[in-house]
Image: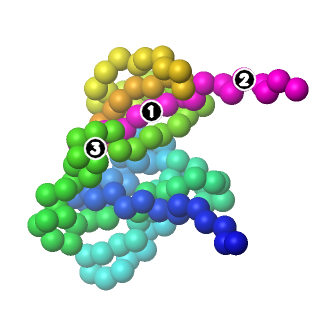
Amino acid sequence: MSSQRLAHTALLVPDYDQAIAFFTQALRWRLLEDTALGPTRRWVVVSPGGADQPGGALLLAQPANPEQAAQIGRQAGGRVGHFLHTTDFEGDRAHMRQHGVRFLEAPRREAYGWVVVFQDPWGNRWDLIQPAPTPPSAA
């Protein structure tokens, strides 16, 4: 049986450099790869962790046609489509606010942890989540 993992998810952005700045500065992600594929195309990968850490990464993609361009900021149809887990909810939220990230609600406590919805510069909705600690299992 093979072993699988989700490696990349494409996110349409209008400009590679603007997107790299948002993810590396406002969210403090790492730029894992930025390779030219021609005069206007690049393979740009960002991730909240390093290349050796588990979890997916985003492949930042500029649209190739008007139909794709029309989907920028609407890739999840207006609902939250991206879920970013953190171990420092308040610290990350404060850093993001300092970098102009727009929060769409006040933080709230849910059964699964602390959560707040924010928007990236293109309108995509994200959940910032600090998961609740898992209770120890009864032995």
Residue 29 x/y as whole percent: 49, 47
Side (left or right) of 71 relative to 43: left
Residue 101 seen by the camera: no
**Circle 1 sits on which residue?**
128
The earlier-in-sequence mark between 2 and 1 is 1
Labelled disc at residue 14: none
Side (left or right) of 136 relative to 31: right
Labelled disc at residue 124: 3
Residue with the most extreme right position: 139
Label 2 to label 1, Cα distance in Å?
A: 21 Å
Looking at the picture, does residue 96 appear above or below residue 111?
below
Residue with the most extreme left position: 66
- Write the residue at 45% across / 32% down: 128
**Circle 2 sits on which residue?**
135
How would you classify the magenta stretch by its main secondary structure? loop
The verdict on residue 123 being magenta is yes
Identify the amino acid type marked 3: Asn
Looking at the picture, does residue 44 appear above or below residue 19?
below
Q: Quadrant of residue 51?
A: bottom right
